[in-house]
Image: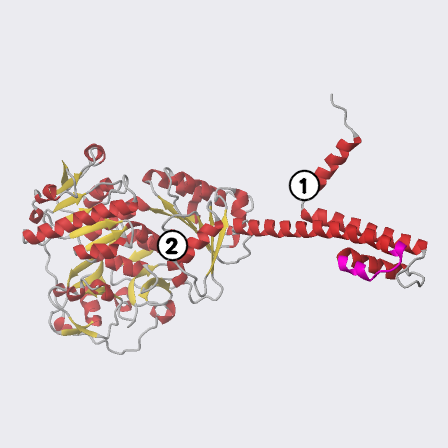
Amino acid sequence: MRPITWLDRLRYEFDNLMSKGPIVLIGWLFLISAIMILVASTLIVFIGVSSDGSPPDFWETAWISLMHALDSGALGGDSGRSYRLAMTFVTFGGIFIVSILIGLLTSGIESKLEDLRKGRSFVVEQNHIVILGWSSQIFTVISELIVANESLSRACIAILADKDKVEMEDELRDKIGQPAKMRLVCRTGSPIDLTNLEIINPHSAKSIIILSPETANPDSQVIKTILTLTQNPQRRATPYHIVAEVREAKNLEVVKLVGGEEVEPILVSDLIARMIVQVCRQSGLSVVYTELLNFSGDEIYFHAEPALVTVTFGEALLAYQTSTVIGLYTATGQVRLNPPMNTVLATGDKLIVIAEDENKIRLNRLANYPIETAAIRQAKNVKAMPEHTLILGWNRLAVTVINELDNYVAVGSQVTVMADVAEASLEINRRCNNLQHQQVAFEFGDTTDRQSLSQLNLSHYQHIIVLSYSDELDVQEADARTLVTLLHLRNLSQQQNTTISITSEMLDVRNRQLAEITRADDFIVSDRLISLIMAQIAENKGLARVFAELFTPEGSELYLRPVHDYVKVDEPVTFYTIIESVSRQNQVAIGYRLRAQANDANHSYGVKINPDKAQKITFTAQDQIVIVVNE
């Protein structure tokens, strides 16, 4: 055994001292400096020497020694051999100590700056919005939240992700810019780590958004994050408001089990599939969804109006000139879109209203509404006929789209799928075997190959859906294939003199501008729509039930119906007239679409939600009314 010497012990104690950090070392340097000055001052006073030959004073000598320790230039004014020798000792000691001190301070400052760069400091915020995780959706989510909170003076969004803080800040600055009123705070850490989670101060947040990571098994990370929040020993007593993105339907029940009423899960695959199905059957509906979901235009609010208690829902539809009533949020928390017109509003009920801003929801003071009764028409019942739908491309949504489409079409309908994915046929046979209204046929073919597409009889199909190959390709390459398919389809339709309705799934919202040259009827930008919904629910928890009603076949849905089903065309009418006519058919009108502006992005592709009801407009036979209907 090696013997332990006093030198070993000294070195060991020195190592322990150095490992205690800059603060402890600075304290030791201060103590050594004080001892050195006291020893030198005591020695000078004991010897009795001074620079000017007068008897030395201890405290004056100590002060002069301190100045020599801090400033080596002070030595030049000394006289006397003994005095100079003592002060030289103090000066050299000071040089050594001050050099170490400067090094420690520099190192400490650099260490602190490095810690700040890593984003490990505690977020001292109240009533802020927390985003856990990082994905391409975060930019849309934050952009919408900035608009939603622009009236607040000290709004804050705090982001915790397993990503470098500086990189996050740079990306946000490049994609979003520097918001005028919203503060964006980034912190580096894992959302499933309790210690890291505390950094972001989730217990004081008004809402928490959990983004699905772009990994092989994203739902497991989301579930762990929810568990970390809800089972945190330091969690708050009041419920959290958590919005979580879920990718697989099989994990939805697990999310509900671990999150309970505190979590509003958004099942991405089902939601996008339902949107694609609804939009493909109604040209322009994607624009309506976008108008309703973003914060830059009109939004959905829950509004209490005591003055309307005891009136019927049908009467409440006409009570606002610049806001549109679409349903009721009852005192028991039930969402009822387009309830029966004779439903009486009770105390505690709130109206579900589309408005530009909540403070602009005001009752009108009209004694008589400007309704052109003579212009009102009654829609004729049209028997549903079998439909033929063509799906080009393949991804994980395709099976859900086929199954959802079965809820809308008449018996005898047909779906044809063309894709160059061999597994697609097996997936159809395995997961689409309970269809009630339609049959499915699969054709193997390259959807970007003109010859393969030209063999299809496009006039045979009422609806064409172009899905991206998002399971196999990256975003830009998948969108590129979609664009090629759309270009071929439009060219073939021109050559065959055929009018076709095309709905396309896009992954990157920036590619929509490129895709507009293909003149496709609708574009579903999956991630963007999900981001908009998450931002809306983060601001208003009750909207989750509204969206659940809108996006399920069993609930109330949005439709675009011909305007001539409700009023006479080619003569001016107010939207009051539209509201009255639509309500007589037990439906709710929320806007219209002008066919003449269908390709004009500056006019929202002809879609106008929540128009001024007193303003007159002349419709043509090709225009449509946007309605909420139970079917």
Residue of label 1: 19
Q: Amino acid at mark 1?
A: Ser
Q: Which residues are magenta?
A: 72-83
Is residue 169 something one can see in this rendering?
yes
- For image coordinates 28% across by 45% down, the residue present is 270
Q: Nearer the viewer, residue 231 or 282?
A: 282
- Residue 332: x %, y % from top left: 38, 56
- For image coordinates 55% across by 49% down, the residue present is 120
- Residue 163: x %, y % from top left: 46, 46
Specify which label sits upstream in the sequence, 2 or 1: 1
Q: Quadrant of residue 589?
A: bottom left
- Residue 54: x %, y % from top left: 93, 63
Question: Residue 533, relative to residue 308: is it above or below?
Answer: above
Is residue 553 something one can see in this rendering?
no
Query: Around disc 1, counting alpha carbons within 10 Å, would you say few (fewer than 14), some (14 to 19), or many (20 or more)?
Result: few
72 relative position to 160: left or right: right
Looking at the image, which residue sits at the far top? 1
- Residue 338: x %, y % from top left: 26, 59
In the picture, which quadrant includes the N terminus?
top right
